[in-house]
């Protein structure tokens, strides 16, 4: 049986308010998040079944990396793989059903699959109400990685916010190496443009490999206008 | 615009689910049904134009920023987005609805193409490359399933017509010895779980999640193996959902 791995789930100590923030202030906020993650509150630890993670990988991840359950050790080390894409171009004005781009790094893949796992298994949100819109973002649309169209008692309790306006917007960043404040800045900038002055809530999900525990640390940052 | 984004997200996921199974006709039916509802409301339907408009503004704003001597490009682009929203009297949520409608429409168009191109394939082609699924099969009134024969295994995918209250993995496990099979420890929570089963001739991992089941079966290939696997899947499914 595939061995399970552990994920420590943290909630970042502060809610980030983006309204009126300049670019420099947003960059500074990203640096603050990167350097203060260790002060986040441990919410709980949970075990991830790699077979189910692979299921969410095929359902939700943007990058087409197969069998992260069977190859978890290699993937988790950040081994680079080539993307297997169909050779012929699709007919004019059509695109393949799974339009994925791939830099060779699998950390983003694990991050997105882990975010879906967190929502479905830990927060008890139906898979059918989670929209994966990262492919649209790659096509140039102003879009988050995920659109979550349902809340749950687990989620409101975890985020310490009794009522969550829907939809909730999700931005995901995965790290196998050291944390990169620049990538956090891009996620905050995207949420800033999506939320603007509306009463929407964004979740910044940072998945970091925990080498010592052979697992992952997942940090959730609540972002509002 | 008071539109429930969840409706279109749910529709996309249902379409994806049927593509996963290989039932393109059902996928297209779901896409058409939902798009027909959306097309009735002009304001909602036109939100896709708004999403495309914002994409154009972002692309154009990125060009020529040096000539315009714009120092803070990110803020400048954000301001252009805000301006456009005010002009169009739209909200950020309208952009998201537009993107989702574009996605659903794109899926439907591609499904048209796939249904047409699949019709031109012979059964021989599909067996040779092993990529085209067999016909959609049914287990009574409970579910649809397909069996894909791959070089090293059979991949069985199934969708239940109705969601189950609980997957009976433990019930299934207790019945396996009747079929000469054993099981490793099941991993399970409310609506999902996995189970590995094996005998001297067969190994399979079973995954269940909400309405979906996936069986990945490895066995020595003999003349009647596929038929045996089909029967086994039918039997196991009945134990899982009753």
Image: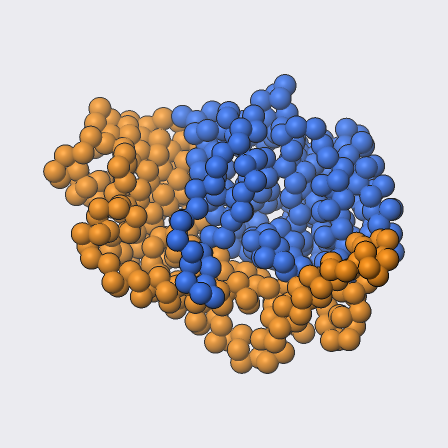
Chain colours: A blue, B orange
- The foreground one among A223 and B84 is B84
- Name the residue at the front extreme: B67
Q: Quadrant of the C terminus of chain A?
A: bottom right
Left or right relative to A154: residue A58: left
Left or right relative to B141: residue B97: right
- Is residue A160 in view from this perspective? no
Q: Quadrant of the N terminus of chain A?
A: top left
The residue lying at 76 percent from left, 51 percent from top is A189
- Residue B98: x, y in percent? 61, 68
Instruction: Report the label total.
Output: 0
Left or right relative to B43: residue A192: right
- Residue B207: x, y in percent? 39, 40
The residue lying at 31 percent from left, 62 percent from top is B117
- Is residue B99 in view from this perspective? yes
- Residue B65: x, y in percent? 79, 58
- The foreground one among B79 and B44 is B79
- Residue B152: x, y in percent? 27, 34
Q: Is residue A146 above or below residue B120?
A: above
The residue lying at 63 percent from left, 60 percent from top is A141
Q: Which picture quadrant has residue B43? A: bottom right
Q: Is residue B201 above or below residue B136?
A: above
């Amino acid at each position: 049986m595939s061995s399970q791995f552990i994920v420590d789930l943290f909630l970042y100590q502060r809610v980030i308010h983006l309204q009126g923030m300049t670019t420099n202030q947003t960059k500074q906020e990203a640096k603050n998040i990167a350097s203060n993650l260790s002060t986040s509150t441990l919410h709980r630890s949970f075990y991830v079944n790699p077979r189910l993670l692979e299921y969410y990988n095929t359902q939700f991840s943007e990058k087409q990396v197969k069998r992260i359950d069977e190859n978890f050790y290699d993937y988790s080390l950040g081994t680079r793989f080539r993307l297997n894409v169909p050779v012929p171009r699709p007919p004019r004005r059509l695109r393949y059903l799974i339009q994925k781009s791939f830099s060779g790094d699998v950390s983003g893949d694990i991050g997105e699959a882990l975010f879906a796992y967190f929502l479905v298994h830990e927060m008890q949100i139906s898979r059918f109400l989670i929209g994966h819109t990262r492919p649209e973002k790659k096509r140039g649309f102003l879009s988050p990685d995920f659109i979550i169209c349902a809340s749950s008692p687990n989620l409101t309790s975890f985020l310490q916010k009794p009522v969550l306006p829907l939809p909730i917007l999700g931005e995901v960043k995965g790290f196998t190496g050291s944390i990169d404040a620049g990538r956090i800045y891009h996620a905050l900038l995207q949420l800033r443009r999506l939320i603007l002055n509306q009463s929407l809530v964004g979740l910044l999900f940072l998945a970091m490999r925990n080498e010592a525990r052979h697992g992952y640390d997942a940090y959730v940052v609540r972002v509002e206008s | 615009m008071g539109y429930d984004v969840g409706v279109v997200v749910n529709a996309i996921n249902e379409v994806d689910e049927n593509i996963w199974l290989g039932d393109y006709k059902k996928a297209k039916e779901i896409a058409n049904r939902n798009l027909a509802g959306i097309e009735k409301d002009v304001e909602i339907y036109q939100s896709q134009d708004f999403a495309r408009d914002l994409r154009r503004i972002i692309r154009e704003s990125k060009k020529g920023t040096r000539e315009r001597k714009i120092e803070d490009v990110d803020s400048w682009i954000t301001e252009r987005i805000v301006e456009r929203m005010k002009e169009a009297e739209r909200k950020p949520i309208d952009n998201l609805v537009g993107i989702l409608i574009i996605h659903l429409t794109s899926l439907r168009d591609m499904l048209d193409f796939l249904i047409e191109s699949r019709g031109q394939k012979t059964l021989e082609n599909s067996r040779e490359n092993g990529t085209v699924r067999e016909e959609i099969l049914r287990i009574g009134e409970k579910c649809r399933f397909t069996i894909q024969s791959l070089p090293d295994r059979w991949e069985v995918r199934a969708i239940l017509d109705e969601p189950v209250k609980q997957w009976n993995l433990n019930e299934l496990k207790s019945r396996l010895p009747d079929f000469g099979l054993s099981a490793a420890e099941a991993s399970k929570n409310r609506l999902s779980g996995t189970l590995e089963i094996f005998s001297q001739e067969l190994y399979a991992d079973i995954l269940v999640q909400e309405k979906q089941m996936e069986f990945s079966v490895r066995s020595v290939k003999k003349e009647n193996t596929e038929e045996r696997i089909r029967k086994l899947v039918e039997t196991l499914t009945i134990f899982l959902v009753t």
